[in-house]
Amino acid sequence: MEKIRSPLEKRLKEWHGEEWHTTKGRIIRDIVYAIDTGLVTTVSFLAGISVSILEKNKVILAGLIEIVSGTLAIFFGSYISTKAQKHFFENQIEREKKEIDENPEKETQEIREIFSELGFSKEEQEIAVKRITQDKDRWLRFMVQEEIGISPGMIDNPFEIGVISAISFIVGALPAIFPLFVVKNLNEALVYSACSVLLFLFVLGVIKTKITKIHWLISGLETLFIGALSCGAGFFLGRFASGYFH
């Protein structure tokens, strides 16, 4: 189906002057989620496998395999879920288009009701109805956004979201496994891994402020605390499970 274009993203970008102010700014949710997943799963896995395997090279190999499998899992998971959402939104838009073609009187009345709820007088409602219904594309854009609450900018590209999530997962996994490549002793490497993860979490929180506009220190500490809590839980769970079954 032909993509329905909205002036919303254009207005946001023009009025606020920043790309991240457009509806695409919500991609930060997918990025942060994938990064945190990469951190937690990698730290948990390394903590568990290091109990059973004492050779650093084997731990690194196992960690790399976990990262590859995790990257594939989050790519296909993001791709499938985004594609399902995309199909749902497109079906809703197509249904609205069909209703405009088959029952224009009902759709016209819905425009009046929308403007009535916003406080417009009957005369003003009729002016709006006349202007909106003069153009079928404009009519469809209005009904899609105002009646069913779907902005065209919400329809993401499944492959794009999958790639972004996969790359973010790898970015999150790197601070956990990188120290194992440069530190000879396995236990020391795990300590450095924990420190690099904590530093990375704080930096991630600071970077987020470019989009969220929260104070950098508050955002950094919040991300550090929540991320450290989840990574710490995963680390000790991995240690406990491996030690129990070892």
Image (cartoon, rainbow, N blue to C red):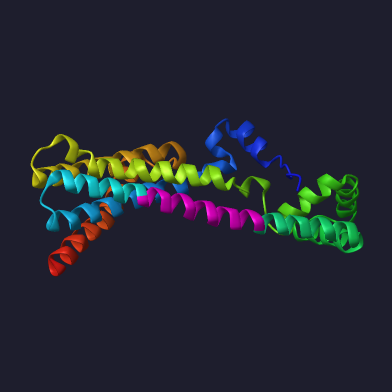
- Whether residue 189 appears in magenta in the rendering, the answer is no
Residue drawn at (56%, 42%) of the image: 24
Q: Nearer the viewer, residue 87 or 5?
A: 87
Q: Residue at x 16, y 61 (%)?
A: 239
Q: Which residue is drawn at 40% across and 39% down?
A: 209
Picture layout, residue 109 above or below residue 192: below
Taking the magenta stretch, the answer to whether it contains residue 74 is: yes
* Corner quadrant of residue 108: bottom right
| Place of residue 160 in the rendered image (x, y in percent of width and height, measured from the top left) | 54, 42
| Camera sees residue 205 | no
Quarter location, residue 207: top left
Magenta range is 69-87
Question: Left of 163 or right of it: where is 121?
Answer: right
Specify whether 51 is left or right of 108.
Answer: left
Quarter placement of the C terminus? bottom left
Percent of width and height locating residue 179 = 18, 39
Residue 227 placed where, x, y %? Answer: 29, 52
Which residue shows up at 85% across the image and 56% down it? 121
> In which image quadrant can residue 11 be found?
top right
